[in-house]
Amino acid sequence: MASFYPAYPRQTLIALRTLAGKETHRYLRIWVQTLLPPAITMTLYFIIFGSLIGSRVGPMDGYSFMEFIAPGIIMMSVITNSYTNVVSSFFGAKFQRHIEELLVSPTPNYVILLGYLAGGVGRGLLTGLIVTIIATFFADLSIHSVPITISVVFLTAVLFSLGGFINGVFARKFDDIAIVPTFILTPLTYLGGVFYSISLLPDFWRVLSLANPILYMVNAFRYGILGSSDIPIGVAYALVFGFIALLGGFSLYLLERGTGLRS
């Protein structure tokens, strides 16, 4: 069993820096595939849902429809890209069998996990920054609370990077890395209050929406930007921290057991 405390701190730091650098260089090197598509897709969202349809919707919660959906679209890009980066990168390492070089090395499991998370979080945040810049061309955004905005987007990127890592561990073929984003992540994101306030929903659907964890992250981020939220911010933080602890512990458990990694 690998010890949490490194026997060789300097070598451990070098391993973490190398792995994090490799993951960061990976998504930057193929920026046409990793950064450009979400920028184009989110621009289309702003044009279609914000300018064309939003002008007919009218104000929502006291804000123009464009201002209301901008935080949700930014958060949607962060969620999607942080998840996708880790699941594709880790499964690629399994498929090409170079993950075995890491497993037989003295690199602690938490360093392996942090290295992959660095790539997912970095891509999620960079994509979120790009989409935020694009959003400023469509909406007049002023940040209500910088600490809440930054902390929520960072924690969300960490959480969905962990989700992507777990998906990558269990994936056995390329189809497996698309199942969760297509059939679970995307529907939850669209139903997570990106384009509407749950106060508009009938009672049944409003209560049902509260079971969607993405709703809390989108609303917490919206509160950071606009100062308006459908749910208490404290509940959102508690939920995110709880899921990070749960998924982080589960990821380390999977690495320790070699689930999906050792034949």
Image (cartoon, grey):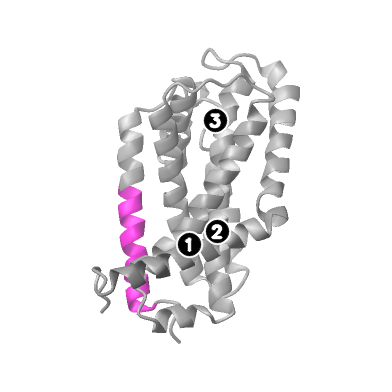
Q: Amino acid at mark 3?
A: Pro
Residue topped by disc 3? 71
Within 10 angstroms of label 1, few (less than 14), some, or many (20 or more) residues?
A: many
Characterize the magenta stretch by its predominant secondary structure.
helix
Question: Can the viewer see residue 154?
Answer: yes
Residue topped by disc 1? 20
Q: How far, Cα to Cα, is label 3 from label 2?
A: 25 Å
Q: Residue 92: which quarter of the image?
A: bottom right
Farthest residue to the front: give it.
10
The answer to whether the residues at label 1 and label 3 have Cβ atoms under 8 Å apart is: no
Assign a secondary structure to mark 3.
helix
Which is more toward the observer, 139 or 104? 104
Residue topped by disc 2? 24
Which is more toward the observer, 52 or 40? 40
Mark before the other along the chain sequence, 3 or 2: 2
The location of residue 83, given as percent across then percent down, is 52, 54
